[in-house]
Each structure stands twice: as structure tokens, then as C-alpha cells.
Amino acid sequence: MSTEQITGAKIVLKSLNDQGVDVIFGYPGGAVLPLYDEIFSQNKVRHILVRQEAGAVHAAEGYARSTGKVGVVLVTSGPGATNAVTGLTDALMDSIPLVCLTGQVPTHLIGNDAFQECDTTGITRPCTKHNYLVKNVNDLAKTVHEAFHVARSGRPGPVVIDLPKDVMMARAEYLPPLRKEAFKYNPKRIPDADLANDAVKMIASAKRPIFYCGGGVINSGPGASRLLTQFIRLTGYPCTLTLMGLGAFPASDTQFLGMLGMHGTYEANLAMHECDVMIAIGARFDDRITGRLDSFSPNSRKIHIDIDPSSINKNVNVDVPVVGDVEETLKVMIDLWKREKCKSDQKSLKQWWKKIDVWRSQNCLKFEQGKDKIKPQYPIKLLRTITAGRELFITTEVGQHQMWAAQYLAFDKPNRWMTSGGLGTMGYGLPAAVGVQIAHPEALVVDISGEASFLMNMQELSTIGQYRLPIKILILNNFYMGMVRQWQELMHGGRYAESYMDSLPDFVKLAETFNMVGLRATKPTEIEKVLKEMIETEAPVICDIHVDPAENCFPMIPSGAAHNEMLLSPADQAVSNTSEEGMVLV
Amino acid sequence: MATEKFINRHTISILVENEPGVLARVVGLFSGRGYNIESLTVAETSQENSLSRITVVTAGTPMIIEQIKAQLDRLVPVYKVSDLTIEGPHVERELALVKVVATGEKRVESLRIADIFRARAVDSTNESFVFEIVGATQKLDAFIELMKPIGLVDISRTGVVAIARGIIPLSEEM
Ligand SMILES: Cc1ncc(C[n+]2csc(CCOP(=O)(O)OP(=O)(O)O)c2C)c(N)n1
Ligand SMILES: [Mg+2]
């Protein structure tokens, strides 16, 4: 082995190379200048300069979510690190693998309230999977390799490495990565055979089964989605997906009931309520899914497959807990199913599907596009039709538009849908689209946005310009923080406190100042032409679509209500009465 | 879940990598998720393997206790989490230093009580004693209760340390 002594900054770059990193998203500052100096004098790792550090983290999330690789972020100390906190929390909630390098003041100044010092490891401890402060250059290579291992192993998540400037300038020998098995942190991937067996038996015995699957399937890799699809088709059972799980099972499959939860479909939520066996895979029973806990799927036996033991029995008690990686577990279960010659109970299943078809015939996602105002659902539905057959990646912001996108976009493949689920971060979609487009330069990348969310990180338009990223930003402009307005209408007597978006910019002119193409539609008849023009334009586009400001997002399970207490349309909303208990929920 | 009303006290042993911030991680987990800490002790137990042992006494419903253990277990520097309360017989000990200010008959009485509890006087002046007492938490509580009317002015307690009975060490499976 060579004993060449190189600087800490060089060690970081070498470690990134050995970890297969080809791009990092960052923003410079005093504490990270040695690293930027190294970046300047190499060309293996590409640096994407964002316009605010929050953008760097969301871009890395988009990159990670659309590729399955670890996203990498580089920010300076103090304000650079604090600006990254929202993105880190977002990545923690949605289990996105990230490594975020933060600059720090030199070790001898730590604790001195030095210029641009902050307690980065203290601040980020609760919003990362793990974090490190590297005080000795001899630990540096080992720490960077371990950080990547931690970020991508088990339930993925963000990892921060805080790098004091003097450590970047000190010298040490470089150490290459260890084998995976050499790390002490190695969460269990292979399920217990007995539990997998119990699960398969319970699945085979079901009369009214449902698969309820989430983002964990996507995190496990494309192989997991393939196996899931195979298993669901083997059984003939219905499947519903969470917001984070969309694409894990093809939406075009007749066994797909749509998304479940607060804005899920009627058939998915009722099937969850009335099932006798629930097969939860890589999903975490959060409050947006369960509604009121004490009436959540009251008569079912539950199987829960998850890589994170702390997700099991957290909110809902399950009968068969299976800890393991989704892909590995499905392999075992499909083998068992075939080996034991398991068969679904066809007679009961037929009855069950009959029931489901009655719920389906409600057609809960129907809407009427009249002549006058553009219904926000319409452009989204149309976008899917006119992009049929194209590689389409969607990011979203947070609000009504996000839910409509989830309801109408129908994803057939994993890793095509990037949205902020757990944290619900407005401003996520635009920078996330930057990361997605960097990873997939040829693909069509559309950020479905609301006018309010767009304003939260619109500085990244400048990044889009710099790298000539042909991103399409589709703003469903309802002149309101629509989701806030909807809750105010439903639960606060229509008192629209501070939810109107006054003084919006002219989005078409805004596009032009950033050398983008600006388009606008204000009438239903203009939509198709404008959308086609948007996707055929090679340059980046902002497409400002004026939609009906009064439209609410349905179906909706009001907070504190159960799955069978869904509001389907404005007609239901008149009679809805949110309980006091429900009012305190978010 | 809200329907579970049975709150039990559990003593949990946690074997951790002795690295900066590990205690903050454990404590932050408890405060961030609203779990309860009745007592917490921590010290290095193996310098060569860089290990520390944390003993936490906590209380919660069975579901919460399971959550606490699962959450602890997924912290990267945590090697082993063991719920001594349910994993078989174990020994719990706590040490307290108790300062009692008293003269005359009360001073004599304090010595008598100390004797019954096998507490030792580790410091004395003409008007005061510092007693050292070791035992289970309840024993210390009882001793302190008795000393209050006599002239108890100050207490310092270590919190519970605990270990399983029998031959198997906590680090066995590492
Ligand atoms: C950073 C942040 N602040 C506040 C919120 C609360 N919030 C949720 S949706 C929403 C309104 C979003 O408005 P817009 O982007 O126009 O989307 P719309 O609902 O109108 O489609 C707000 C304020 C949030 N999710 N994120
Ligand atoms: Mg809006």
C-alpha cells in the first residue's frame, strides 16, 4: 500500500470517486474553500452550483430518488449548514439516501462562536440518520466510506459529515473503502424463515385481502417492484399504494385500486377498511394513511414487511411482523408460495372483487371540465395522455396540485415520481427536478407546481438556466394556497386568513428573464395546445395555467375521521362535521 | 396506542460505541419522541473496545417500550439493547450521598437509621454527616424519607445501574 500523504480535501474527493459519485450539488463558502479548490482541479466529479443550500439538498434528493444512488451535497459552515436542515429533515422522513458534507470552522475555534460557526452536528442530530464531526484527518477516509454505507444500508437516510477547515488542509494517507461486511452497522436484510412462512400461509388463507405498499418497495430497488408485481399477479389480490409508493406496482394494472389515505380513492380506502388480511410492505401506517386509528381496518389480520423494526407496531399492532429487505423477503415468499402450491381462495376472491367493483363504479376521481374555468385535474390528466410512451419524470411541490398529480398521473414504473411525502415541504419540487434532470439528461422532467410553492425556491431558475436543463414547470395557478384554503373552507367557516396569493409575478415574463419559455393558459380550450407546446419545447418552460380557485381536492378523509367516512364531493362537504379531536390534527 | 393503559417501569441496558455525541443521541431520542427517563447512567466499560454502557430506567405501555427499544437499536453507534426487566433476573443498584445536618438526639438517631440501612458515614462535622448508601432504588427512597425529619439537606444520587444475573454478558452476541 502506498503511504503517500495527501490533504484532507484530496482524501474527500478520492473517497467520493471510490464511492462512485459522479455529481454533487453544492454552494461554496469560506469553510469549504479547500474542497472547492480540489473540485476545481479535477473532472471526475461534476459540481452543480445551486442558488440556495435548500436547493442543493432537494436536488440531491431528486437525484437519489430517481436513480437509487446516494445523493451528495456540499455546503459551507454556519448558514450553509442551517439552510440545509429542511432538506435533511425531508430526506429523513422520506428515507432518501444522502451524504451531506458541511464545512466547519477549524477545530481549535470550535465552541468559540467563531465567524460562521454553528453546532452542525448538534443541529442535525435529530434530522439525520447519523452524523459525524471529523476532528482528525486520519479518520477522514474511513468516515466518508462509512457515511455512504450508513446512508444506503437498511432504511436509507441522510448522513452529515462536518469537516473542519484545518482537517481539510492536514495530510494523511488515503484508505480505500472496506467490504460491506466489515462495517459494524449492518441491518438485517434476510427475513426469518418462520415468519415468512406464517405470512405466506396467512396470505393464502385470505378471503378479502389487500396489498398496501409504500416507498420502502421503491427504496429496496427496481427488483423489489418487479417481484411485488409478480407476487400480486400470482395471487390475484388487489393492491393500493401510498403517496411514496406510487410506481411500485403498475397503475395501469386492473389489480391496482389507486392511492390510499387522506386523498386516496374510495375503493382503496374502503378495501382497507373491510379487508380480512392486510399485507403491508415498506409502508409505515402514518396518520395520513390510517385516519382515526381506533377504527382503522378493524377486522383484519395484518402482515407487515419492513426493513426498519421500529416501523413495526409503532402505530398499529400487526399479527405477523417480518423484518427484512423487501426484495429479499418477496423472493423468499414467492418461492414459498410456489413450493407450497398455494392458491388464492377463488370463490371468496371473486366476491371480494365484486364488492370492490361496486366501489369503483363510484368513479370517485371523476370531474367535469366545463367551458368556463379550467379544472386543475384536467391538465394533469391530459399531461399523462399526451406523454404516453415517453420517459416522464414528475416532481411536485406540496398542496392540492400534489394530490391531483398523485391521483391522476398513473405511474407504471418506480423512481419516476418525486414528491415530499413525510415532511410536506413546499419548494421541494423545483430543485428536485434539477437533480432528476441532471441524472436523466434526455428525459422529460416536469415539476407540477402551485404558485405559492413555486415562490419558495424559485431562485433555482437561475441554476436551470446555467446548466441548460430543459425542465418544464407546470404551475396550477389557483391564486391561493389551495390546500390551506380548502381546510379553511371545510374547518374554519370559510375564513380565508392569509391564504390568498397577492402580488404574484407575471410568470411568463419571469420565464423570459431567466431565458426560459413562458406559456399561459386561461381557458379550457387552450390547454391541449399549451401542454403540447410545453413538452415539445427544447428549452426550459414555465407554464402558467390559471385554474378554478374554488376547486377542492376530493376524495378526502377529514382529519380524525375513519376510512369509511370519506367526503367524495362538495355535496358531502356540506354535511361534514369535523370533530373537535379532528380539528387539532394537522 | 391510547387503548393501552398499562404503564410499566423498565430497566434497559444499552451497549454503545464510546464516541462523541452518543449520549446526546440517546437522550435526544427520548426527549424528541416524548419518552420518559426516570434515571440514566453512563460510563465507559471497555477502553480497548471503546464501549460504554448506558442504563436507562423508563416507563411506558408495552407498545411504547417496544418502540423505545427498536428506536435505540437503530441508532448507528448502538450495539446492543437489552430489556433487563423482561429478559430474566437481574440486579439493580443505585448509590446515594445524603447530607444530614443534626445535633443532639437527632444526630444519634441518624446514625441509628444509617446502621439499619448499612449506610456509611463518609464525612462528618460536629453538626453533619454525609452518608453513603447503596441498594435498590426503593431502599434509597426509604432511607431518604426517614432522614427528612431528622435534618436532610442535600442528596446526590447516581441513578440505577443494572446487570443480568447468571453467566452471560451483555456483549456476548457482539
Ligand atoms: C414550507 C411549507 N410551509 C407551509 C406549508 C403548509 N402548506 C401546505 S399546502 C400549502 C399551500 C400550497 O399552495 P400552492 O403551492 O399554491 O398549492 P395549491 O394547494 O394551491 O395547489 C401550505 C401553505 C408547507 N407544506 N410547507
Ligand atoms: Mg395555489
Image (cartoon, grey):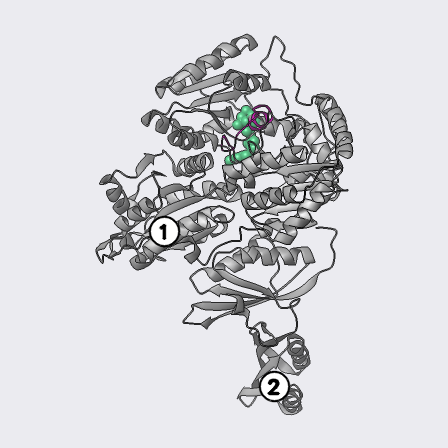
Q: Which part of the image, by quadrant, shows the C terminus of chain A? A: top right
Tell me if the residue at label 1 has its CB under 8 Å from ligand 1.
no
Q: Which residues are magenta?
A: A402-419
Chain under disc 1: A
Q: Secondary structure at mark 2?
A: loop
Report whether A346 appears left or right of A453: right
Residue with the mark numbered 1:
A144
Are discs 1 and 2 both within one chain?
A: no
- Is residue B96 positioned above or below A196 on the image? below
User: Is A336 situated left or right of A47 in this image?
Assistant: right
Query: What residue is shown at x 73% (from left), y 39% (from top)?
Result: A580
Which is more toward the observer, A499 or A173? A173
Q: Is residue A355 left or right of residue A478?
A: right
Query: What is the CA distance from the residue labelled 1 to the residue labelled 2?
Result: 52 Å
Q: Amino acid at mark 1?
A: Val
User: Mark 2 falls within which chain?
Assistant: B
